Image (cartoon, helix red, strand yellow):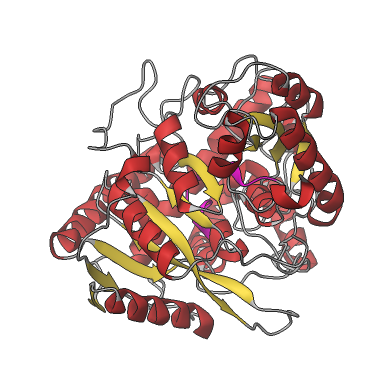
């Protein structure tokens, strides 16, 4: 089954198990063999759970994905008795005692979890290169990043270890790796997928959990399996009219789609990222949709400041909590995380609240846009995946950062314009995705374009992003299914796969 294993999506593997053409144990061994063959090169799986997976594969499993091998992300997707590190050295020995709600739902769906995938420390970066685990590499070009923060998940799916893997998106962390690795990635609406039991929301509601997949139907069916509020959730989002697995069987109808290729930060956009959108617009028009240039009336610089303010504050809170939980000292955290936390501690509570209130302004502006357009189309990223190590802090800047930390000079960083500089440097490669996070709207990255890229031996994937109205994952999935049929991508695989 080894070669045949890689030809199936998760739904196809589940059908094989249901018909008894193959057992859950045989599928797991195929996945483990695939991991043994490629994980040393891509470094996607950071915490193996082979024994747990083998024990589960011998059980009588039920659910729509009974017997399908699966990986979860090494942050917030807690598995009882297995460390959750979040890519942080201070959490290397932290072992949660209960499953996260989403993990329990993965299990209830019948999935066989056999490992956890790498993420940057605290899921803070668009690359996956934590000091704890080392760099995860893109299966399309091993010298480049698979993106972040769900970089390990994306690399594992693209390399054929699993057909789907758990992921999460607080600033683009499903969509960015999907774009870089040639996968389909849907970020659900705020509240669609539970964050419990230890949390009400992640990142003030900016983050949503879901999966990275090769097929649209897997994403739809898995969202059916994990969606809905858990006990004690702060609110319950309106359920879809139809299960998503049924919704994708119906065409989306004629859609009005506004598109833009301009970075909301005013920074450069790579020509192939522009080409990806223009070709998608042409394809959509040929399918009968109305497509025209348009964008919501939102100040991209202001939105980015609101995002990084949350980012700073969350990092400060996370480090303080982990120190209390584990007794770890500063050496347990990466330098960049400590700088972000210092800024977070320096920003006043009032400033944080004001920036959080601005999220409503962006949501209202996007809502007005959606009164005219069903979807908003942009590049998923503004640049192709960078090379491994390209985003490392230079030695001189590291020395300066150490001095600032020693002095506790957070106010100096803010007054010096460092925050504005951080906004541009950290988001200029990925300026399109944060809009969906702050407005709580669903969005997706669809792999419709591959192109030759300087420095890479073969064509790399470039994703396009669609943003929908709050709660309207169905329209996204219906359009994705239509695009998948018109321009299939599942058989486009990197050489390592």
Q: Residue 140: x percent and y percent? A: 70, 67
Q: Is residue 132 left or right of residue 363?
A: right
Q: Nearer the viewer, residue 439 or 301?
A: 439
Q: Residue 416: x percent and y percent? A: 53, 64
Q: Residue 451: x percent and y percent? A: 59, 81
Q: Nearer the viewer, residue 437 or 447?
A: 447
Q: Is residue 423 left or right of residue 78?
A: left
Residue pictured at 50% horizontal, 60% vertical: 419
Residue pictured at 46% horizontal, 83% vertical: 275
Q: Residue 131: x percent and y percent? A: 79, 48
Residue pictured at 45% horizontal, 29% vertical: 195
Q: Nearer the viewer, residue 323 or 251?
A: 251
**Residue 143 sits in quarter:** bottom right
Q: How many marks?
A: 0
Magenta-highlighted residues:
162-176
In the rendered view, would you say 477 is above or below 386?
above
Quarter in which the N terminus is drawn: top right
Query: Can I make out residue 310 in this image?
Result: yes
Quarter in which the C terminus is drawn: bottom right
**Residue 322 sits in quarter:** top right
Residue pictured at 66% horizontal, 56% vertical: 158
In the rendered view, would you say 389 is above or below 474?
below
In the rendered view, would you say 354 is above or below 177?
above
Query: Can I make out residue 203 in this image?
Result: no
Q: Nearer the viewer, residue 197 or 361?
A: 197
Asked if residue 164 is among those painted magenta in the image, a careful observer would answer yes
Asked if residue 110 is among those painted magenta in the image, a careful observer would answer no
């Amino acid at each position: 089954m080894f070669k045949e294993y890689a030809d199936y999506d998760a739904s196809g593997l589940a059908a094989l198990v249901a018909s008894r053409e193959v057992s859950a144990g045989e599928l797991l061994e195929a996945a483990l063999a695939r991991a043994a063959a490629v994980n040393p090169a891509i470094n996607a799986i950071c915490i193996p759970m082979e024994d747990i997976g083998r024990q589960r594969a011998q059980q009588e499993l039920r659910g729509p994905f009974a017997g399908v091998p699966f990986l979860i992300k090494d942050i917030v997707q807690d598995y009882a008795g297995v460390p959750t590190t979040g890519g942080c050295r201070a959490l290397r020995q932290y072992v949660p005692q209960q499953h996260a709600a989403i993990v329990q739902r993965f299990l209830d769906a019948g999935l066989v979890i056999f490992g956890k995938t790498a993420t940057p420390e605290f899921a803070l970066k668009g690359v996956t290169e934590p000091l704890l685990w080392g760099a995860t590499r893109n299966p399309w070009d091993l010298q480049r990043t698979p993106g972040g923060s769900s970089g390990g998940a994306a690399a594992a799916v693209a390399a054929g270890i699993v057909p789907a893997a758990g992921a999460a998106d607080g600033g683009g962390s499903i969509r960015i790796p999907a774009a870089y690795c040639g996968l389909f990635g849907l970020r659900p609406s705020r509240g669609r997928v539970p964050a419990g039991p230890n949390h009400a929301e992640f990142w003030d509601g900016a983050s949503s959990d879901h999966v990275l997949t090769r097929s649209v139907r897997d994403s739809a069916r898995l969202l059916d399996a994990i969606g809905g509020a858990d006990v004690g959730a702060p609110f319950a989002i309106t359920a879809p009219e139809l299960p998503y697995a049924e919704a994708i069987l119906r065409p989306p109808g004629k859609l009005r789609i506004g598109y833009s290729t301009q970075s909301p930060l005013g920074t450069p956009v790579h020509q192939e990222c522009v080409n990806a959108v223009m070709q998608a617009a042409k394809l959509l028009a040929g399918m009968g949709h109305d497509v025209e240039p348009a964008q919501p009336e939102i100040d991209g610089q202001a939105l980015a400041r609101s995002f990084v303010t949350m980012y700073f504050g969350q990092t400060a809170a996370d480090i303080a909590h982990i120190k209390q939980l584990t007794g770890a000292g500063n050496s347990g955290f990466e330098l960049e995380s400590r700088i972000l936390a210092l800024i977070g501690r320096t920003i006043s509570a009032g400033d944080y609240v004001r920036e959080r209130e601005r999220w409503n302004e962006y949501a209202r502006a996007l809502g007005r846009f959606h009164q005219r357009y069903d979807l908003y189309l942009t590049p998923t990223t503004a640049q192709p995946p960078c090379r491994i190590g390209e985003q490392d802090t230079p030695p001189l800047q590291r020395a300066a950062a150490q001095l600032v930390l020693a002095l506790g000079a957070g106010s100096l960083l803010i007054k010096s314009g460092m925050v504005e500089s951080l906004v541009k440097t950290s988001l200029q490669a990925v300026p399109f995705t944060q809009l969906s996070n702050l407005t709580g709207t669903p969005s997706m990255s669809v792999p419709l374009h591959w192109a030759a890229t300087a420095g890479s031996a073969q064509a790399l994937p470039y994703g396009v992003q669609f943003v929908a109205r709050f709660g309207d994952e169905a329209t996204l999935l219906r359009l994705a299914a239509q695009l998948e049929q018109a321009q299939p991508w599942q058989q486009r695989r990197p050489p390592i796969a």
